[in-house]
Structures are given as structure tokens and as C-alpha cells.
Image (cartoon, grey):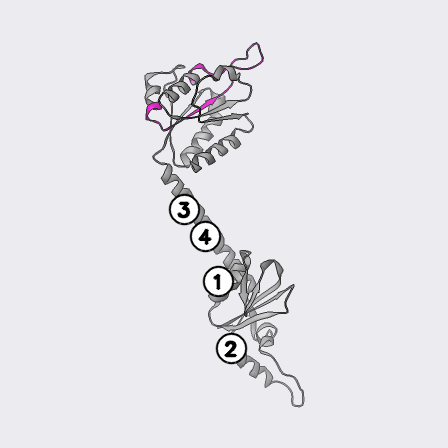
Amino acid sequence: MFYHILISTEETDEVYEIDHEDLNYIKENMAKPYLQNKDFQVDGYFIEPSKVKRMIITTTGKASNYLREAKQSQVSPGVLYVYSRKECVFEIDDYKEDITREVFEEIKENITKNEEKTLKKSNDDSADSNEDTTIFLAYSYREDDDEFVSGFKELLENKGYKVIDGKADRLGSISDAIIEKIQISDIAVIVMTKRDKKENGKFTTAAWLLEEKGAAIAFDKDVAMFVEEGIDETDIGGLQGDAQRFHFTRNNFLKVVMNFVKILEVE
């Protein structure tokens, strides 16, 4: 089989290459770069993808010279017409098969598969690099808090982090078990949610979260605080060493934690 490609652009007449015996050459050097929006070369011309108006890829059973001679032999005596090799491989249906669509579909499918493999490898590498990092996740274990913090925990675990919390202890105050968990962690993440409304219209947060934050700082851990909008900042300030502080609402919590995870990945 022989393979041929024809390009027309805004700046050039039709340019083409014919009689390739390896379709992969056309795929890798012309069709694929075009689909990836990269410059490519046809018959010595450098082509910008954005200026391509038409691309045709065909296949024939014989080389163009053979087809031209066969077609020329069919010309009636006395008729002055000379067939070109180009005509035989791009225009005469008796000889050529247009395979442009199937070539494009195959290339697009392979590009997608390669992108998925690259993304998976990147995620796997990220998970491998994070698997030795332990995060202590502190939050109020009320049911309504559990619902949205559980998604945060799952996200961190999917990224390869080991996440521990004090949910099993449920003491309502800091304990030796919690202290031990903070000590073995690399990062402490404190999610402070609203509790009781104060006279000034602001809200308190769980007292033990402030204690756990203080313990993490005392143990020289990196600390990230997620503070729900409306909590009185005067209640949670005063301790030095916060690595990060993020404010959130119930509606934008996922977006905020995604930004935090991006920061973790960079660090």
C-alpha cells in the first residue's frame, strides 16, 4: 500500500507528498503535529496549523506512476489530456481511498490515552512522594461537620497522605492520645467551625481545637487553620507560628481545600 497527504493553506497553493510506504511517517510528522496545534513540514514547506484549510490523507494499492500510466492508457486516441500523479492519488475514486477521518480518530484516541497515562503517572508519583507525610486533621466531630470534612480527608488520602484524627477519642478536650497523634504527625490541619453565637454577633469554636492548635505549634509542627466565616478572630489569635490560615464558608470549602492541597504539592 502507498499513502499520500495533501494540504492547502491560506498562504500556499496545495502542497503534497505522495508514495509513502509507511503511513506512520505521515501520522507522526504531519497529522499528529497538526492535531496538537504544532508546526509541521510538508514537501519542504513549514505549515502553521491555524492556517490549514484542508488536509487529505489517501491510500492506493499502487504507486502514483503506475496509476498515472494506467489511467493515461485509457485516454481515447486523439484526445490530448495528460493525467498527473496528483490526480491519480487524490482525485480519481477508482484508485484512491480517503482515510483522513480514520487516521485522525486513531491519533486523537492515542493522544487521549497518552495524556491519561501521563496524568496517572503524575498522580502516582505525587502519591508516592506524599506517602511518608502524616497529617493530623482536627475538627469538631458533629454530624454536620463530619459531612464536609470527610471529603477533605478523602482528598488528602487520595493524594497519598496518611491522615489521622481524634474522632475515635471523642473526648471533647485534648487528651494524651491526641497529644501522641499530634507528635507523630508532620502537619496539623485544624478545621474551626462555628459553635455558639456571642453577644457581639460573632461565633465561638470548639475549645479543644484551640488546644490542639497550641499543642501542634508547641511541637513545632507546620499548622494550617481553616476558619469558618463568622468565628471571632480574637478567640483564635494570639498564638504564633501559624503556617497558613484559610477562611471558608460551607459553600466554598471544597474550593478552599483544593487551593490548600495545591500549596502542599508545591512544598
Which residue type carries mark 2?
A: Ala
The disc, 2 or 3, on the residue closer to the chain's N-terminal end is: 2
Which is closer to the viewer, label 4 or label 1?
A: 1
Q: SS class of the residue under badge 2?
A: loop
Other-residue count near label 3 (Cα within 10 Å), few / some / many at <14 / 14–19 / ≥20: few
The disc, 2 or 4, on the residue closer to the chain's N-terminal end is: 2
Q: Residue at x 37, y 25 (%)?
A: 221
Task: Note whether 233 is above or below 150 in the view shown.
Answer: above
Which residue type carries mark 4?
A: Asn
Q: SS class of the residue under badge 1?
A: helix
Find the distance from the CA under tag 1 to the CA under tag 3. 23 Å
Which residue type carries mark 3?
A: Lys
Find the distance from the CA under tag 2 to the CA under tag 3. 43 Å
Residue to which mark 1 is pinned: 28
Q: SS class of the residue under badge 3?
A: helix
Residue to which mark 2 is pinned: 63
In the rendered image, residue 127 lying in the magenta stretch gets the answer no
Which residue type carries mark 1?
A: Glu
Q: SS class of the residue under badge 4?
A: helix
Residue to which mark 4 is pinned: 114
> Which span is picked out in magenta?
182-208
The disc, 1 or 3, on the residue closer to the chain's N-terminal end is: 1
- Give how far across and how far down residue 10 sits, in percent: 65, 63
Residue to which mark 3 is pinned: 121
Which is closer to the viewer, label 2 or label 3?
A: 3
